Image (tube, rainbow, N blue to C red):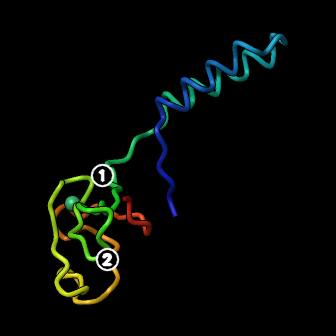
Amino acid sequence: MARYIDADALIEQMEADAEHIDDYIAKMMLYASIDDVKNAPTADVVERKRGEWIKIDKYDKESNVQCSVCLEEFDYIDGVCYLCHGYELPLFCPNCGAEMLKEVEE
Ligand SMILES: [Zn+2]
């Protein structure tokens, strides 16, 4: 499976690493690798949004929750999550599609 990375962040880190290399040959090899990364073909990917459920009232265990990405608020009714008709919050926000962390931010 392909793995996508932030190439600009990697290049920045590699250039910072190169500054600490005293050996000329090793330094040139690292710069050659940096050029390889710069010239690598790119893929058309969509960045996955990640968020977390935030309790509106952190002192109420049946508090409505809000998506940290799109700020949409969802109801708890009698202890049951309106979104999923169960006690567990969904792993994805149904409004914006963000993948949610399992922990509820309070
Ligand atoms: Zn959302």
Q: Which residue is mark 2?
A: 89
Task: Report the mark closest to the observer, 1 or 2.
Answer: 2
Q: Is mark 2 within 8 Å of ligand 1?
A: no
Drawn side of residue 32 relative to residue 79, left or right:
right
Q: Residue furthest right?
A: 23
The amino acid type, in three-letter code, at marker 1 is Val
- SS of the residue at dot 1? loop
Q: Residue furthest front?
A: 59
* Location of residue 86 in the rendering, given as x and y in whole percent from the top left corner: 28, 89
Towards the viewer: 19 or 83 = 83
Q: Residue 60 is drawn in which quadrant?
A: bottom left
* Point 22% across, 61% down: residue: 66
Drawn side of residue 99 relative to residue 103, left or right:
left
Count residues near mark 2 (Cα–Cα under 10 Å), then give few for <14, some for 14-19, many for 20+. many
* Point 80% across, 19% down: residue: 26
* Location of residue 38 in the rendering, given as x and y in whole percent from the top left corner: 49, 27
* Location of residue 48 in the rendering, given as x and y in whole percent from the top left corner: 34, 55
Tell me which image quadrant ligand 1 sits in. Answer: bottom left
Question: With respect to residue 4, does 42 lie above or below?
Answer: above
* Point 54% across, 23% down: residue: 12
Drawn side of residue 49 relative to residue 25, left or right:
left
